[in-house]
Image (tube, grey):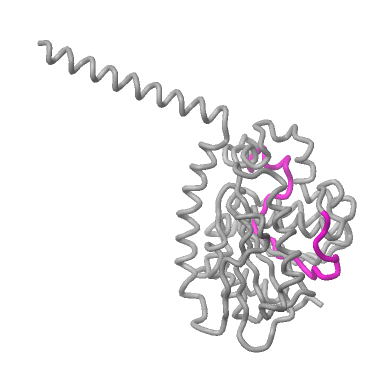
Amino acid sequence: MAREAHKRRGIKRTLFVCVLVVLALVAWTKLSPWPSALAIRAVFDMGGAKMARKLEKHVPPAGVNEMRDVNYDGRDADAKLDLFVPAGKPPRTTIVWIHGGGFVAGRKSEVANYARILASKGYGVASIEYARAPGAHYPVPVEQANRALAWLSTNAPRYGIGRDRFVLAGDSAGAQIAAQLANVATSRDYARDLGIQPAVEAARIVGVILFCGPYDAALTRTSRDGKPSWFMRSVMWAYMGRKDFWKDPRVATFSVARYVTKDFPPAFISVGNDDPLQAHSYLLADALRAQGVHVDALFWPEDHAPGLPHEYQFDLDTAEGREALKRQEQFLSSLR
């Protein structure tokens, strides 16, 4: 009898502890962006690794030299970049690729195979790393990307790539950072508002390639059906450093689509028709065209089937992914 009573008390204590743990986790998610950010990071890391594996078979077997984990700022442990250089004639144009991951996830290693593919087509590619939220807040990644560009401006010839023709490129969160960096270089007012001194002259940024990015803070508060988006509210809380991120005065400069000028570089913009961030790409393309900027947009019909998800361009097993790569090549070839 005593043994049964002891067993029941043990079960009750275990249940009590479990309830306390659950309540603590719930409270933590209300008070901190870390739980959601770590959950998103875990999912994205698995997806990024899978994507990298799928791209392996599309990488040419030879013809690209690479240097990994080159430090672009000795004071910053996160400031690493990978360089991919086509063998033979030194490339005139250097693509600076900024990876995605919702500002809380992603690694440059995940896009390394895509960078190798681009380099095999005759372009130098620098794929940069940056600090992830919530460990770092806006606009730290933009500042880091600017420092990477400064480093490339000085050191690129040592590695056999050009420093006078940069194309800023990125996917998802990286596309947003790339768009901001282009605007920093081409808009004195925007650079002042963001507090970043441009690393290179505007004339040396000859184009931008932007896939599936978020370019307007107001659109991050809702999804396409108009309801609150848990994902975007979570990552923006982590990135901006406050739960009511829309009240942060810094969030205005995040909305790069509202700040573009006529001097913004020619842009290639694409997004899938089933991407929850689709409206952002449409908004940015319209804003650039209104300023007279050349835009090469690869948008898909709303009824395109199967629907093309976020980051569709990395799936080179599909005709649509291959079309996106082909259109990028055409865009790059058109740049003067």
User: Residue 122's x, y, as percent?
Assistant: 65, 81
Report whether 60 appears left or right of 185: left
Q: Is residue 162 above or below residue 48?
A: below
User: Residue 133's x, y, as percent?
Assistant: 61, 44
User: Total number of numbered labels?
Assistant: 0
Instruction: Name which residue lies at 75% across and 32% down.
Output: 247
Magenta-drawn stretch contains 207: yes
Per the rendered image, the range of residues in magenta is 197-224
Most foreground residue, 157 or 280:
157
Q: Is residue 33 above or below residue 63?
A: above
Q: Residue furthest left?
A: 1
Most foreground residue, 194 or 285:
194
Instruction: Name which residue lies at 87% across and 49% down.
Output: 192
Task: Judge whether residue 279 can be spotted in this image.
Answer: no
Q: Is residue 80 above or below residue 218?
A: below
User: Residue 101's x, y, as percent?
Assistant: 58, 52
Q: Which picture quadrant has residue 313?
A: bottom right
Task: Judge whether residue 153 can be spotted in this image.
Answer: yes
Most foreground residue, 305 or 36:
36
Which quadrant would the N terminus be assigned to in this image?
Answer: top left
Report whether 300 appears left or right of 163: left
Instruction: Name which residue lies at 17% across and 12% down.
Output: 5
Magenta-drawn stretch contains 141: no
Most foreground residue, 274 or 317:
317
Which quadrant would the C terminus be assigned to in this image?
Answer: bottom right
